[in-house]
Image (cartoon, rainbow, N blue to C red):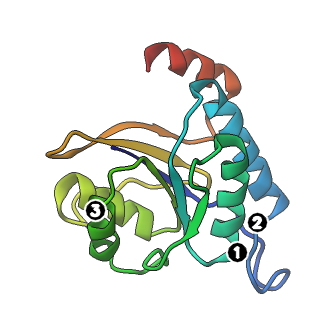
Amino acid sequence: MRLILVRHGQANPVDIDPEKGLSEAGRAEIARLLAIIGPLQLSVDEIWHSDKARATQTAQLLARELKAKNGLRLKRNLGPNDDVALLGDDIMTESKDLMIVGHLPFLSNLLSYLLSGDQHKCALAFPTAGMAHLDYDGRRWCLSWFINPEFGSAEFGAQFQSYH
């Protein structure tokens, strides 16, 4: 099983957009991320996302390019401060490849929980539009790679593909 965690793109400030949807900068971040991962030809069975506009819009942009077999799924327990154990239990009942689009501190806590069993043990800062790829071997989760689109480029994606 493969799990891909993605933090939403940069949101509009609440005084401009009370729903805090994706800003133009956030859409550009997701476009950069897609350019980086394009050569990897990633696919997932389903994309789970929170009900917040910035996560939903990010998931929609990713779904267009990744062609998620079962599409998008609005999922409970994906809010910024939700209990990661609840979603961790849901993940463990799945056998399909998933992408989860969410928020901080939730994603960092979930990553730590899956890797160590403790949501506070090994933090990884997720920049907006950051992506973590994990594999499950039937016994444990392993972090395969992490992409920060701020430092990436399409050339990086092409080079990365040759190592993956």
Label 2 and label 3: CA atoms lie apart by 31 Å
Q: Is residue 131 left or right of residue 157?
A: left
Q: Secondary structure at mark 3?
A: loop
| Secondary structure category for the residue under label 1 | helix
- For the point 62% across and 61% down, the residue is 8
- The single residue placed furthest to the left in the displayed view is 139
Q: Which SS class for mark 2?
A: loop
> Label 1 amino acid?
Ala
Residue that carries the numbered disc 3 in the rendered image: 93
Which disc is residue 53 wearing? Answer: 1
Q: Residue 85, located in which quarter of the rendered image?
A: bottom left
Q: Residues within 10 Å of mark 2 (few under 14, many from 20)?
A: many
Q: Are marks 2 and 1 in contact (CB under 8 Å)?
A: yes
Q: Residues within 10 Å of mark 3 (few under 14, many from 20)?
A: few
Residue placed most toward the observer, 42 or 125: 42
Instruction: Tell me which label, 2 or 1, sits earlier in the chain.
Output: 2
Where's the C terminus, which quadrant?
A: top left
The residue nearer to you, when weighing 96 against 127, is: 96
Q: Amino acid at mark 3?
A: Thr
The residue under label 2 is 22
**Residue 155 % position (x, y):** 67, 19
Give the vertical position of 124 relative to 104 (above or below): above
Which of the 4 image quadrants contains residue 125? bottom left
Q: Which mark is residue 77?
A: none
Mark 1 surroundings within 10 Å by alpha-carbon count, few (fewer than 14), some (14 through 19), many (20 or more): some
- Residue drawn at point x = 61 percent, y = 52 percent: 129
CA separation, marks 2 and 1?
Answer: 7 Å
Horizontal relation, residue 93 to residue 41: left or right: left
Q: Residue 162, how many percent across, how many down?
A: 50, 13
**Residue 139 in view in this figure:** yes
First of labels 1, 3 by sequence position: 1
